[in-house]
């Protein structure tokens, strides 16, 4: 008996997609963090983010009938980020259909295919989140490599003529930037303080597993996990310590030799309201003897204040 593809489409949407999304956001420390900063957008080719930087003039003390002048040049403009599309296909060939005609076999086959999609999405999206968006002809997510930089154009704004849009990049080497050196706690503290303004501080620190091990060697048995986010990440099974009261987490997708300092106040993970892990109906594949379905995600990572983002570079490490 032929498979009921309408029933499979409904089953995917109601049962498997919610579980896939939940597993997706719990699979990686950066994704756990982004889930809290997820914000939908209604459509369009670009996401517009109002920027936050500098201070306005006219804020001052006054007395009685002083003449007050106001600065109308409020330092907020906007960055524009292109939307990025990710597709994960589910394909059931005619042979698979014939071999899995029983209800139990069908459910088992569909579950296995959804699991493959889930694992592939985790790997692809998290890798793109650390890259610069130029992959696959510029179709990839605009990730941290583009956001936390001090050259090039980001969000449509040229950093060579707008230095306020630069992120803070600090070399870990004491005298020779570009040369790897043993991780320095002093450099980490300097960068953290540079990125902080009172209680407006980085709230998540990310690095690769080998780089995280270098930090672990420096603070072994001296650091406890006290923050809510740190405990949450540790409960999910991620290697977590703390630095300056903030979680520092090992992410296998993060490039080694770098430590990223992030501030969630200025970050959003933008997802399209109609393509937020949206499952298309099963239908005939035009190029194969098969039926196909896709899981669609339209999104991008955006920031509105790059001066509160930073990274420590030139860290030597031993590959795992």
Image: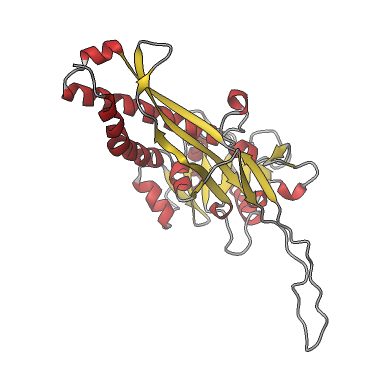
- Residue 147 found in image quarter: top right
Q: Where, by quadrant of the figure, is residue 19 drawn?
A: top left
* Residue drawn where x is 63% and y is 56% of the image: 193
Give the percent coordinates (x, y) of residue 290.
Answer: 34, 14
Q: Is residue 200 left or right of residue 151?
A: left
189 versus 255 height, above or below: below
Is residue 187 in sight in this rendering? no
Residue at 19% over, 17% down: 101
Residue pictured at 52% horizontal, 30% vertical: 318
Instruction: Relative to 249, say whether 252 is above or below.
Output: above
In-image side of 43 versus 290 (left or right):
right
Front-lying residue, 49 or 130: 49
Where residue 302 appears, as percent x and y from the top left, is 59, 44
Of residue 255 and residue 119, the one placed in the foreground of this image is 119
Residue placed most toward the observer, 5 or 85:
5
Horizontally, residue 232 falls left or right of residue 97, namely: right
Quadrant the N terminus occupies = top left
> Residue 72: where, in percent of width, then height?
78, 65
């Amino acid at each position: 008996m032929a498979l009921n593809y309408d029933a499979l489409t409904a089953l995917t949407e109601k049962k498997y997609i919610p579980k896939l999304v939940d597993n997706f956001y719990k699979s990686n420390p950066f994704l756990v963090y982004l889930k809290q900063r997820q914000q939908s957008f209604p459509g369009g080719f670009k996401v517009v983010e109002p920027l936050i930087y500098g201070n306005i003039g006219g804020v001052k003390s006054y007395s009685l009938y002083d003449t007050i002048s106001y600065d109308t040049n409020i330092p907020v403009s906007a960055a524009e980020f292109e939307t990025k599309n990710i597709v994960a296909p589910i394909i059931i060939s005619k042979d698979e259909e014939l071999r899995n005609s029983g209800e139990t076999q069908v459910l088992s086959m569909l579950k296995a295919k959804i699991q493959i999609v889930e694992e592939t999405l985790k790997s692809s999206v998290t890798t793109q989140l650390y890259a610069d968006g130029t992959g696959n002809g510029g179709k990839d997510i605009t990730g941290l490599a583009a956001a936390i930089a001090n050259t090039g154009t980001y969000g449509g704004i040229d950093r060579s003529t707008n230095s306020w849009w630069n992120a803070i990049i600090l070399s870990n080497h004491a005298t020779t930037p570009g040369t790897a050196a043993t991780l320095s706690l002093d450099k980490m503290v300097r960068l953290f303080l540079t990125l902080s303004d009172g209680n407006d501080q980085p709230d998540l620190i990310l690095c690769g597993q080998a780089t995280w091990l270098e930090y672990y060697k420096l603070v072994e048995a001296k650091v406890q996990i006290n923050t809510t986010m740190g405990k949450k990440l540790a409960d999910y099974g991620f290697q977590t310590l703390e630095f300056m009261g903030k979680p520092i987490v090992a992410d296998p997708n993060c490039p080694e030799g770098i430590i990223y300092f992030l501030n969630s106040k200025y970050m959003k993970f933008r997802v399209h309201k109609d393509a937020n892990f949206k499952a298309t109906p099963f239908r005939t594949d035009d190029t194969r003897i098969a039926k196909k379905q896709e899981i669609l995600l339209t999104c991008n990572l955006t920031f509105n204040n790059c001066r509160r983002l930073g990274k420590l570079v030139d860290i030597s490490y031993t590959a795992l």
